[in-house]
Every structure is written in structure tokens, then in C-alpha cells.
Image: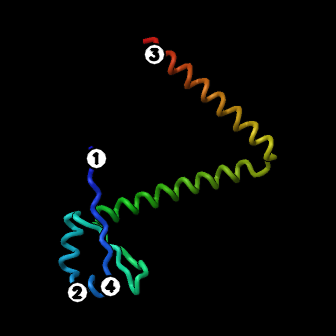
Amino acid sequence: MASCAPSIQTKNFTDTRQHLSQIVNQVARRETRILIEKSGVPVAGIVSADDLRRLAELDAARDERAEAMREISRAFADVPLDELEAQVTRALRQTREEQSRQTARDAGR
């Protein structure tokens, strides 16, 4: 089920401070997200607790992928680049062939 993302409103810091209670209520109801500017420069945002949780989950997932890439890099650090590229090309070809065979089997059912 697709959900409609809240709108993003840009407000200056002074306006945000003056209307903070109203802004927090709108954000909590997921009606809006607030981008706060100081002297025309974006400096902060106000988002719902749910948005903040999702952002933390995205950060954690990104960190896990980055660590996996670092581990792969360390594991293949001594492999010459041309050999590594050849192995990757072979692995991709095998995977594509397996997927093609599976698609053909699924179509035959």
C-alpha cells in the first residue's frame, strides 16, 4: 500500500521558534516536514518520530552494505584487477544463464 509523503515546508528559524507548538503538531500528524533555514541556508529539519526511525534504519542498512563492500575489497586485495574482472564477468554470465533457464522453466509450467 503506497502512502502519501508529507509535504516539505521551508521556514526560517525565527518563524519556526514562534510557531513551534503548531509545527510539532503538524509534523506529528504527518501533515508536513519542516526544513529550517537561517539566513536563507538550510540548517535543520523537523520530521515525525516515524520518519526519524526510518532514517536511522536506512543509515544502518547503508552502513551494513558499506562494511560488506569493505570486507569484499579486503578479501580480493591481492587479486590482480584483470583477473578479478574476468571472474566477475564469468559469475555474471553464469547468473544470467541460470536466470534465463529458470524463466524458461517457469514459462513452460
| Residue 13 disc label | 4
**In which quadrant of the rendered view does residue 37 lie?**
bottom left
Residue for badge 2 = 18
User: What is the CA distance from the residue labelled 3 to the residue labelled 4?
Assistant: 59 Å
The quarter of the rendered structure image containing the C terminus is: top left
> Which residue corresponds to the image point at 66% horizontal and 49% vertical from the top-left?
72
Amino acid type of the residue tagged 4 in the rendering: Phe
Residue for badge 1 = 2
Q: Earlier in the sequence, mark 4 or mark 2?
A: 4
User: What is the CA distance from the residue labelled 3 to the residue labelled 1?
Assistant: 30 Å
User: What is the CA distance from the residue labelled 2 to the residue labelled 3?
Assistant: 63 Å
Residue in the foreground of this view, choosing between 80 and 26? 26
Residue for badge 3 = 107
Estimate how packed mark 1 is, as few (under 14), some (14 to 19) or many (20 or more) residues with alpha carbons within 10 Å: few
Q: Earlier in the sequence, mark 2 or mark 1?
A: 1
Q: Earlier in the sequence, mark 2 or mark 3?
A: 2
Picture layout, residue 38 above or below residue 61 = below
Residue 86 appears at what percent x and percent y?
Answer: 76, 37
